[in-house]
Image (spheres, helix red, strand yellow):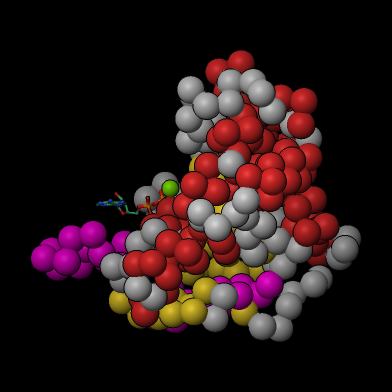
Amino acid sequence: MNRAREPIIALSGVRKTYEPEREDSYVLRGVDLEIGASESVSLMGASGSGKSTLLNLIGGLDRDYEGEARVLGRDLRRLDDRELSRFRNLSIGFVFQSFHLLPHLTVRQNVSLPASFNRRRSAASVAGLVGDALERVKLTHKADSLPTRLSGGERQRVAIARALFNQPSILLCDEPTGSLDQRTGAMILDLFGELNATAGITLLLVTHDPGVAAEAARIIKLEDGRVIADSLSLDQKENSR
Ligand code: ADP
Ligand code: MG
């Protein structure tokens, strides 16, 4: 087990409600959590248990919460809007169930979208980063295709390449295999495992599927907005890599 010492994600007493005027409407009810650099972690729980809410908060998409969330050593609520955008763009990669690709742009253009938030990159460095990202997901040969010409698995690989574009430290994945058949999903999970093992990217994988969750080294279970279990996955116990 390569659990690093210094937490890259640290939540303490995190509470969240979407309806502050309603009593007892908290969807996160006091979450304490530490994740080390280069860990691979599944966040599991039934639909509605607060997984996406927690992931969005860690990724800086939502700053309306109580308690403390430190990611890469920064207290997210203390960042101003510019610092927060920069943090999201450069440090965090998001992957969603429904890919969120722009259909009228080619694979290459979709992958380079994050560059439009960072004008300091030269065209040559953008091209280099796109090339690297596409190589990582083994889609170099589809660079000029439109997403509509790709299979579901290929589309998700484009979305992953886009998430990798800025070489983030953390990859946040919300039900990333939810729209894929089992075999394709397994390939995507292998890819995440490889990125974690070779590039040392910290992986946080949200899923309601125990089979998917078992692909990560550590499984955290959420129920009604609280962490109810946090343990090594069975696979890891059997053959501790
Ligand atoms: P999960 O991802 O585990 O299915 P979510 O974090 O999406 O759970 O949702 C947790 C709870 O918060 C659910 O009851 C959901 O209806 C509610 N919720 C999620 N997003 C919003 C929102 N934008 N506005 C109001 N309620 C929301
Ligand atoms: Mg969700």
Residue 234 visible in the current orientation: no
In the rendered structure, does residue 28 fall within the stretch colored magenta? yes
Look at 49% across and 24% down and name the residue there. Answer: 103
Quarter of the image for the N terminus: give it: bottom right
Kindly give the residue lying farthest to the left in the view shown.
21
Image quarter for residue 211? top right
Residue 160 in picture, x, y percent from top left: 63, 43
Q: With 59 as the anchor, is 204 left or right in this view?
A: right
Q: With 224 as the anchor, is 175 left or right in this view?
A: right
Look at 64% across and 64% down and name the residue there. Answer: 169
Quarter of the image for the C terminus: give it: bottom right
In the foreground, 66 or 75: 75
In the foreground, 68 or 129: 129
Please, what is the dominant secondary structure of the magenta stretch?
Answer: strand
In the foreground, 231 or 160: 160
Residue 200 in picture, x, y percent from top left: 76, 63
Does 241 sit above or below residue 122? Answer: below
Look at 37% across and 79% down and name the residue there. Answer: 78
Residue 48 visible in the current orientation: yes
Look at 48% across and 35% down and name the residue there. Answer: 100
Does 191 sit above or below residue 200? Answer: above
Image quarter for residue 25? bottom left
Residue range corresponding to the magenta coloring = 8-37
Residue 122 in picture, x, y percent from top left: 62, 51
In the rendered structure, does residue 85 fall within the stretch colored magenta? no
Kindly give the residue lying farthest to the top in the view shown.
149
